[in-house]
Amino acid sequence: MSPAAASHTVPIELGERSYPIHIGSGLLTDPVAWEGLPRASTAVVVTNVTVAPLYLARVRQMLQVHYTRVVDVVLPDGEEHKDWHSLNTVFDHLLGQACDRRTVLFALGGGVIGDLTGFAAACYMRGVPFVQLPTTLLAQVDSSVGGKTAVNHPMGKNMIGAFYQPQRVLCDLDVLRTLPDREYSAGLAEVIKYGPIADAPFLDWIEANLPALMARDPAALAHAVRRSCEIKAWVVGQDEREGGLRAILNFGHTFGHAIEAGLGYGEWLHGEAVGCGMVMAAELSHRLGLMPAGFVQRLRDVAQRAGLPVRGPDLGVPRYLELMRVDKKAQDGEIRFVVIESLGRAGLRGAPDALVGEVIAAHAG
């Protein structure tokens, strides 16, 4: 069954691994949204110290209708805790509670919790089902959708992980009301990226409706989340394991991941690094002769209006290049970048170090 009529469902079409993304208000307390979950005796909710006081009680209440036992794992908050220690904390709870291979994991939190819980689900007893309950805008429009799970390594972001699809994603728009402004802006970065890479009219819509989005207008927010998920669903449905097309979803991420790793995880939020990285990637697209200079200014303006940083930290060009060579898109030591080939269409290209250095020098420090 689908959740209440006020919600919208976006399907992820992956054959036997297909699943729905439900988007709407009040889903965390809508009994219909919780129907048809995998059958088991035990549910494990993985969350963090920030989210737990806000939403854990209501999630437990909904799960206790369907499961005999509900176990909580409450982790520290922050990107710096997306690591082996937190992953092992989840495993310690699963093993300590004698959880079997039918146990269902529920990821209640932002991208860190979603990625880490998904990876734990992929590994525990060689795979147990899990459900995404994203509580940040970034997680709702990006990280909870598509089955990319991982933890960070000091030498690179998301370098250790697996492709593992959830059973369902519940995007309750009401939870975004409690999101701090900085976290909300970080999520808008992942909304903005969908325009340049896949849908030029959506970028027009974002620019025109940014005041409403910044005010968290429910109608504007519902459209932004829905359209973002539709675009990601279309991409993932064609390229689940990032063999080609799916790489375009990493627009701005090569520069952004270097910023995160170079500063230390948690210093900048992921979406902040991506927002700045998109401006750098737009500049690279321009210097490669693909896009006019006006596009760079346009993207910088919309990022600034969304409350995102548009100038990177001064890590030094050599350090940026060193960090970007660890990027998963790199091949044989060559850094490859998602660039905009025409508005609404992206591609993956290499670029000379000297040219990349010029981009960094122009937009960092």
Image: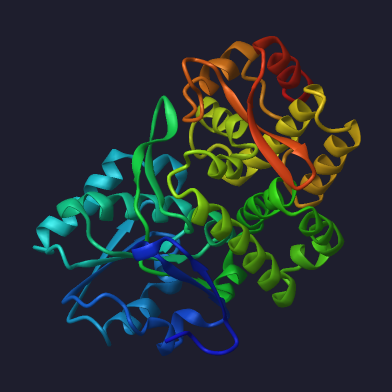
In the depicted structure, whether residue 105 falls above or below residue 121: below
Left or right? Give the position of 203 relative to 5.
right
Left or right? Give the position of 134 relative to 226.
left
Q: Nearer the viewer, residue 195 or 181?
A: 195
Left or right? Give the position of 125 relative to 279.
left
Residue 213 falls in image quadrant: bottom right
Residue 178 falls in image quadrant: bottom right
The x, y position of residue 317, in whole percent, is 64, 14
Q: Which of 83 and 239 is in front in this view?
A: 239
User: Residue at point 81% right, 42% down?
Assistant: 299
Left or right? Give the position of 189 relative to 117.
right
In the depicted structure, whether residue 363 falls above or below residue 95: above
For this orientation, the residue located farthest to the right is 294
The x, y position of residue 305, in whole percent, is 81, 51
Q: Which of 13 and 8 is in front in this view?
A: 13
**Colour convention:** rainbow
The x, y position of residue 229, in whole percent, is 59, 62
In the depicted structure, whether residue 355 falls above or below residue 17: above
The x, y position of residue 37, in whole percent, is 31, 78
Task: Tell me, yes or no, if residue 92 can be seen here.
Answer: no
Q: Nearer the viewer, residue 362 or 180?
A: 362
In the depicted structure, whether residue 62 falls above or below residue 310: below
Task: Tell me, yes or no, if residue 259 can be seen here.
Answer: yes
